[in-house]
């Protein structure tokens, strides 16, 4: 029951994280910085984008301007992302900042795209909206201040958040590599480093990481579930898929972070979690990733960093099965629970 025992510690980390975010919002001089390395910051990295009304009018259509800059609302069931369930990332329609991962999108039935959580809390800003005789919480893009929609408390458990966003306030970057023009803009990495909750959380905080999801890979059975994988009989590892922008963070930097995030000398265990599902592994998607991983391991072994040799497996990526919804962004959900 190692996971339960770890809760107290994790909640504390999160509390301090949230305080850090609030501080960062109050004044830019006091940024949130996590001790784990220079790339591990989020909120303070949002670059504010300021344009005059005239400039916005020059780059937005009239309907985009009405919704994004004048807090308008599009007609329900009319927007192009209401019934859209491709894998990828939804970005701000005005400035392109990545805001919501497709894994958090769900059908609320309201007629507008609905999400359970943003990619990171610092990507959004909230304001009380008392228009139309109601008290609602308006959601804006933290980078450019554009209106996106509202957030309500009638979403799915556990967090119950329902981000109700106008399609026209969004753009979409597909994770599908076949989709031509987005092809070179993102890359995918796949890591196993013990319990995927914490590993996903840490990768999600790295600048340049666009989205993450947890799942199972490297096994020999079809349709793995958490229960089956926990029985340690399917051969699957708990793994994190990381979609990143190689112009902002390199695969090598992600590998460095991966080795920092866990102890790669432990065989089939991390801390209190034991079993092959908690093994240390890099699942490579191409020859360059394989070479980079092998080189990183050789360097670590040649260094004095560990007493024991690195046991991390380097394997070609096989089928990745997304884990059950409640495992996705697990620590983020924990931190939102009051
Ligand atoms: Zn924006």
Image (spheres, rainbow, N blue to C red):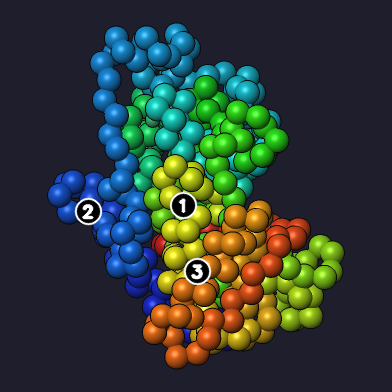
249 and 166: which is toward the camera: 249
Residue at x 49% of width, y 44% of height = 245
Mark in the foreground, 1 or 3: 3
Mark in the foreground, 1 or 2: 1
Q: Position of residue 212 (x, y in %)?
A: 55, 53
Report crowding for label 3: few under 14, some 14 to 19, many 20 or more residues within 10 A (C-alpha). some
Q: Position of residue 60 (x, y in %)?
A: 43, 14
Q: CA distance from mark 3 to mark 2?
A: 31 Å
Q: Is residue 239 above or below residue 149?
A: below
Left or right: 115, with 23 as reference point: right
Report crowding for label 2: few under 14, some 14 to 19, many 20 or more residues within 10 A (C-alpha). some
Residue 186 lies in what quarter of the image? top right
Task: Look at mark 1 in the image and give the residue it sits on.
Answer: 250
Q: Position of residue 163 (x, y in %)?
A: 50, 40
Residue at x 41% of width, y 24% of height = 94
Q: Residue 31 has which mark?
A: 2
Task: Name the quarter showing ligand 1.
Answer: top left
Report crowding for label 1: few under 14, some 14 to 19, many 20 or more residues within 10 A (C-alpha). some
Residue at x 26% of width, y 16% of height = 52
- Answer with mark 3 or mark 2, whichever residue precedes in sequence: 2
């Amino acid at each position: 029951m190692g996971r339960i025992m770890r809760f107290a510690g994790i909640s504390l980390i999160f509390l301090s994280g949230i305080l850090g975010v609030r501080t960062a919002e109050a004044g830019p001089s006091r940024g949130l910085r996590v001790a784990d390395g220079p790339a591990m910051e989020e909120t303070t990295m949002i670059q504010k984008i300021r344009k005059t009304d005239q400039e916005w009018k020059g780059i937005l259509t009239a309907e985009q301007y009405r919704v994004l800059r004048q807090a308008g609302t599009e007609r329900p069931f009319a927007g192009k992302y209401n019934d859209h369930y491709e894998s990828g990332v939804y970005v701000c329609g005005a400035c392109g900042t990545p805001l919501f991962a497709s894994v958090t999108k769900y059908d609320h039935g309201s007629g507008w795209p609905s999400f359970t959580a943003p990619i990171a809390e610092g990507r959004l800003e909230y304001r009380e909206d008392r228009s139309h005789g109601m008290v609602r919480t308006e959601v804006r893009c933290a980078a450019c201040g554009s209106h996106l929609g509202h957030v309500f408390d009638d979403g799915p458990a556990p967090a119950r958040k329902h981000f109700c966003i106008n399609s026209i306030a969004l753009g979409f970057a597909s994770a599908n590599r076949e989709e031509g023009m987005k092809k070179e803009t993102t890359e995918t990495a796949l890591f196993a480093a013990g319990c995927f909750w914490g590993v996903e959380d840490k990768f999600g905080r790295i600048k340049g990481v666009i989205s993450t999801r947890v799942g199972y890979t490297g096994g020999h059975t079809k349709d793995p579930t958490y229960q089956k994988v926990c029985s340690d009989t399917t051969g699957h590892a708990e793994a994190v898929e990381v979609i990143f922008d190689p112009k902002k963070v390199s695969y090598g930097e992600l590998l460095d972070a991966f080795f920092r995030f866990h102890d790669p000398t432990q065989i089939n265990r991390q801390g209190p979690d034991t079993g092959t599902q908690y093994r240390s592994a890099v699942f490579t998607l191409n020859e360059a990733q394989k070479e980079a991983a092998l080189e990183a391991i050789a360097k670590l072994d040649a260094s004095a960093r560990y007493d024991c040799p690195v046991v991390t497996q380097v394997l070609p990526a096989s089928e990745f099965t997304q884990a059950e919804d409640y495992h996705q962004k697990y620590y983020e959900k924990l931190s939102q629970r009051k």
